[in-house]
Amino acid sequence: MITKVDIQEATGSIQLCAGPISGTETAVHTAQALYQQEKTEAILLIDASNAFNSLNRLVTLHNIRHLCPSLATVLTNTYRAPTKLFVDGSVLYSREGTTQGDPLAMPMYALATLPLIKELKSIENVKQVWYADDASSIGKIKGIHEWWKKLTTIGPRFGYSPNALKTWLVTKEEHLTTATTLFANEGVNITSEGRPYLGAALGKPEFVLSYVRNKVQSWCSIVDKLSTIAITQPHAAYAAFTHGLSNKWTYLLRTISGIGDLLEPLENDVRTKLIPTLTGQSSPNDDLRRLLSLPARLGGLAITNPMSIAEAEFTASTNITEPLQKAVIEQSMELPYEITESQIRTRKKIREQKRDECKLNADRLKQGLPAPLQRSMDLAQENGVSTWLTTLPIREFGFNLHKGAFLDALALRYNWQPARAPSDCACGKKFSVDHALSCPKGGFPSIRHNEIRDVTANLLSEICTDVCIEPHLQPINGEKIKGNIEDGARLDIAANGFWGGRFDRTYIDVRVFNPHAPSNRHSNCYRKHEMEKKRQYEQRVQEVEHASFTPLVLSASGGMANQATIFYKRLASSLAQKWEQPYSSTLYWLRTRITFSLLRSAIQCIRGSRSRCGHAARPNPPMDLAVSELHL
Ligand SMILES: [Zn+2]
């Protein structure tokens, strides 16, 4: 961490790849701002041949000793001797450049180009913007020409060889003739239209617009493909969309202003193709579309509408990068930590604003929704209920749903009629989601209860001794006890050493209730169920067993009552200690696991398969694997 600050301070603000906040976005914004200045005549976009691999190691290591001593030792140890590359049984020695996959490659590259940048800085009427090997110079054409000459002369000494054939000079229309004359013998491509730059575009507005249109077209075809995949793999397609694809256009929205309307074809595809296949419903109306665009924790599916976020994303990006842009425009070789600090503050503020705005939108939207959908939103907003949507669907951890289960899970979330559901239940009553979650026929509610009991007991056995399922309580011999005093009464789990010392015993009783049942449709229902359990057992457990009692009350949609929340937090904390993992990731994993158990049980209630196959307690996968693979 100390080194990160050192590297940033050493590289300054012209080379933006060494870890300043939003480096690429800053490069794009700065280049665009400079190009729009009246006095600017052109911008030269360099392509360097094989840049990372041809870095001169000896020179680099020598320079880094002076530029950033705190990084020098580790890099010297890594790169002093040639790196071995194994190719088909023979060994190649890599003597130059950085090694692929080395996390220090970027900072090393940034530091390596620094002396080159410094030497080029002496040229007048030109400003440089660097992002790793993507170098550019902006200003008067004469200055740019001088800069290019010097770069091609001294660059190769550092292992930086510009490739003229792939290098582009973008000039303003009125300077095209000057540019063509001056660069006549350089072999560089010249245009007055525009060019792509770091995933965005520079040049005439028409060029930028057509660049965006092309991008939108290519994304539309990806969304189409994803919609086809969603027919058989909706869960995977959903994760690919929310975790990956949608970030692509967010970047473009952040770097080019005023393009929201151009994304209409994309939004149309999302709305009329992707969402219907993902949800198994028809294309959503305006209200439902807005609901689905909310974050999962607010009841949505995080399928944002690119048109409606365009302006906010661009403003956010400009505000975050502003102080750094200034430093680049001043061509400062320093990057004071105050700049980074102010960027961090701005970013935090923007996040908070965004969160507040989302909440406000959600509240406003909710008021106009039909009552059942309002109830769905309330349930989906309960703590931890929506983790099944935000977690990567990895089969190994049991976090993936097959196509039918994914559609059913969404039907449960939004109170939609599940596809191909029978009109009547096997018990003879009319079928509905509410009825299915409570109907005792087939014993599904008790399977759901037992699933939570078993998962919990299984995890308890990792940290407690003498864990047992369905422990008997001692008979009552005249003690004055309120609540359940039956002989042979049993609770769900008992374990030693959970609360208190090693021999302190805890009795646990589980209740999973149906949140859609009319009697449970009020905000106090968690408390009501908890109190009922306590009245029945707490006194008997405390006074006869000399143990503590914990009621575990959960809703079938994944919500938890107070005591259950505290219980699982404590469980996560002990597991985190045992597995040597961060508490927050362990808690997240634990809640996700419980949510998936409840979800599968709820789906079983609807679909009514009588087999218990697949519901046996699954062994706990190694926690470190879960943390890294699920990005917890
Ligand atoms: Zn029934």
Image (tube, rainbow, N blue to C red):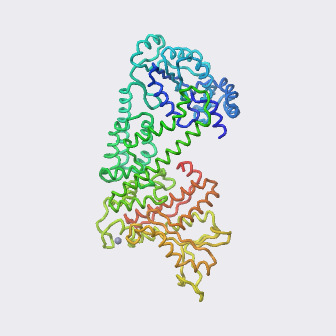
Residue closer to the observer: 503 or 530 = 530
Residue closer to the observer: 25 or 454 = 25
Q: Quadrant of residue 1?
A: top right
Locate residue 66 relative to residue 588 in the image: left or right: right
Q: Position of residue 2 (x, y in %)?
A: 67, 39
The residue at the point 54 percent across, 50 percent down is: 632
Q: Position of residue 497 (x, y in %)?
A: 65, 68
Q: Position of residue 445 (x, y in %)?
A: 43, 70
444 over 355 or under it: above or below: below
Q: Position of residue 94 (x, y in %)?
A: 62, 27
The answer to whether one can see residue 119 in this image is yes
17 over 514 or under it: above or below: above
- Number of marks: 0
The residue at the point 66 percent across, 35 percent down is: 6
Ligand 1 rendered quadrant: bottom left
Q: Residue furthest front?
A: 38
The residue at the point 60 percent across, 21 percent down is: 116
Locate residue 257 relative to residue 158 in the image: left or right: left
Residue closer to the observer: 186 or 392 = 186
